[in-house]
């Protein structure tokens, strides 16, 4: 599980990205990169980190399911993900 401070920081970054999204779009269309650099660093969407919704794991996440690879496998074996089953050949 990711520590609470990491998850809270990620939420703060998401709010900052949403706040400056329209302004960033306008500045990029205008080509004003000097003004873009004066925006807060956390206003960039690349600063957002994906975490597993169940465990908080930061690596090996599937965007479609919003869970890490380990939990995806467990949920699939339990039959909780429709249409997904263990491969056998």
Image: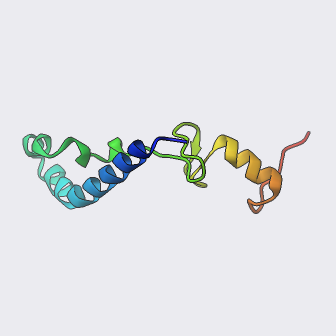
Percent x, y of residue 2: 50, 41
- Can you say whether 18 is above or below 77 in the image? below
Q: Is residue 47 left or right of residue 79?
A: left
- Near-viewer residue (29 or 43): 43
Q: Which residue is drawn at 82% across and 50% down?
A: 77
- Near-viewer residue (33 or 19): 19
Q: How many labels does the image show?
A: 0
Percent x, y of residue 42: 25, 45
User: Residue farthest to the top?
Assistant: 59
Percent x, y of residue 59: 54, 36
Q: Is residue 75 left or right of residue 55?
A: right
User: Residue farthest to the right?
Assistant: 89
Q: Which residue is drawn at 74% across and 53% down?
A: 75
Quadrant of the snapshot with the N terminus: top right
Percent x, y of residue 12: 31, 52
Q: In this view, does 75 lie to the left or right of 43?
A: right
Q: Residue at x 54, y 46 (%)?
A: 56
Q: Which colour scheme is used?
A: rainbow
Q: Residue at x 47, y 46 (%)?
A: 50
Quadrant of the snapshot with the C terminus: top right
Q: In this view, does 71 lie to the left or right of 78?
A: left
Quarter assignment of residue 40:
top left
């Amino acid at each position: 599980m990711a520590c609470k401070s990491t998850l809270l920081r990620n939420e703060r970054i998401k709010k900052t990205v949403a706040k400056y999204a329209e302004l960033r779009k306008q500045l990029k269309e205008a080509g004003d990169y000097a003004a873009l650099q004066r925006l807060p660093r956390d206003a960039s969407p690349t600063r957002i980190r994906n975490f597993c919704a169940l465990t908080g794991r930061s690596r090996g996440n599937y965007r479609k399911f919003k869970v890490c690879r380990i939990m995806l496998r467990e949920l699939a074996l339990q039959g909780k993900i429709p249409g997904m089953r263990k491969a056998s050949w």
